[in-house]
Image (tube, helix red, strand yellow):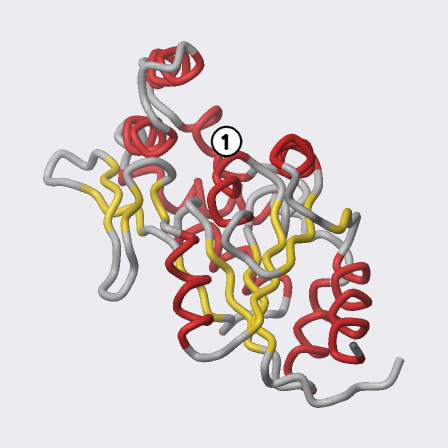
Amino acid sequence: MTDQPQSNIALVLDFDGTVTLANVGEIVINEFGRDGWQKASEAYHRGEISLRELWALELAHLRSGDHEAMRSRAMEVGEIRPGLVELVEFCGRNDISLEIASSGVRFYIEAILDKAGVAGLEVAVPDADYDDRGHGVMTFRHGLTDCGMTAMCKCERVWRQRRLGKTVVFVGDGATDFCVALQADHVLARDVLAGYCTQEGKNFTPFEDFFDVREFLARLGEG
């Protein structure tokens, strides 16, 4: 594979189920959420609340005293999809902007990336803070946009790159990626997102690992 300058390309990656093989956020909630979070999940599946409302309600059932245990557990279960390190190196050599945009929360995302040897990647995600009772609260740092449907507004991260004149490639797998998949110039999808793209007539490229993503970027740069 020949590396060519590709400074007009921006790559945006989902995290849970995309960067990681498992949905780490779901595992953390299942194992550490206090009794009652299941009612929020049931309400979501009945169509009564949005994904953003579901995630906020689930985070409210986490406790500050479990923070380090949750972080450690996330690093145990957060196996990285093969090829991420090589993809990061490829993007660095070719001046491709790379960002992770996710509705998952910062404390476990950054811990997993650090363990994988790719600490320092640009990450656009909510934070899990705690109120004076030690209950989890979703917050957003300056410059990030809270989406009423999916929590983190991934569409805004695509628009941000487009305003810089970039061609945006999005890689994802789940329901929080539906909106952004329709905004990106190119989509690599798997699982639920692949089904959605097929349903909506959105062109996409299937992928299994980040070696597939790297190959796609190489072809895109040659086109």
Q: Residue at x 42, y 62 (%)?
A: 157
Where residue 147 appears, as percent x and y from the top left, is: 31, 44
Q: 114 left or right of 107? A: right
Quarter of the picture holding the N terminus: bottom right
Q: Residue at x 35, y 32 (%)?
A: 55
Q: Residue at x 34, y 27 (%)?
A: 50
Residue lying furthest front: 201
Tag 1, which secondary structure? helix
Q: Nearer the viewer, residue 54 or 127?
A: 54
Q: Note whether 32 is above or below 130 in the view shown.
A: above
Q: Which residue is mark 1?
A: 26
- Name the kind of residue labelled 1 in the image: Glu
Quarter of the picture holding the C terminus: bottom right
Where residue 11 appears, as percent x and y from the top left, is: 59, 67
Q: Residue at x 76, y 88 (%)?
A: 4
- Tally the marks: 1
Q: Nearer the viewer, residue 140 or 163?
A: 163
